[in-house]
Image (tube, grey):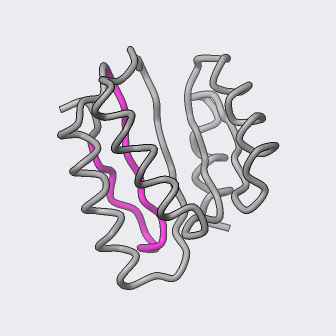
Amino acid sequence: MTIKLIPHQPDRIVGFKINGRIEAEDIERVVKSIENRLEQEEKLRIYAEIDNWSGMSLEAFIQDLKFSLQHFNDFEKEAIVSDNRWLESLAALGNTLFSSIEVKHFIFTERELALKWISS
């Protein structure tokens, strides 16, 4: 299992850890969790800890893209926690391309700050 769900309070926050290569089964599990939460919450926030991400299969990429386009307006914030500095550039790009969601990058020593920010 490359993606592990992290329980968070309040329920509007979907948290997960990524370690390894993402496959279609991982995306399916995350999508089910998010869709269940969207039945209860109007907008969600994403908290993602990314340790050692080694890419994703083509099928996973297509599923993720399809889901993202369908639920584009269902998210308001995303906190990315990772020591991979290239993800900081990706977060900045996301802010430029998708103005409806605020994305911030944090390093692992800033995990508590990321949790505080995503909860506020």
Give the percent coordinates (x, y) of residue 5: 29, 49
In this view, the residue in front, 114 or 44, is: 44
Q: Residue at x 33, y 25 (%)?
A: 58
Give the percent coordinates (x, y) of residue 51: 43, 23
In this view, the residue in front, 46 or 71, is: 71
For the N terminus, the image quarter is top left
Relative side of 98 to 43, left or right: right
Q: Residue at x 69, y 58 (%)?
A: 101
Give the answer, above or below, for where 76 lies relative to 31: below
Residue segment shown in magenta: 4-20
Give the percent coordinates (x, y) of residue 109: 61, 29
Q: Tell me which secondary structure the magenta stretch mostly adopts.
A: strand
Residue 71 painted magenta? no
Q: Residue at x 45, y 44 (%)?
A: 65
> Which corner quadrant of the image does residue 23 belong to?
top left
In this view, the residue in front, 67 or 106, is: 67
For the C terminus, the image quarter is bottom right
Give the percent coordinates (x, y) of residue 34: 36, 64
Q: Residue at x 24, y 40 (%)?
A: 26
Relative side of 57 to 46, left or right: left
Relative side of 46 to 52, left or right: right
Give the answer, above or below, for where 16 lies relative to 100: above
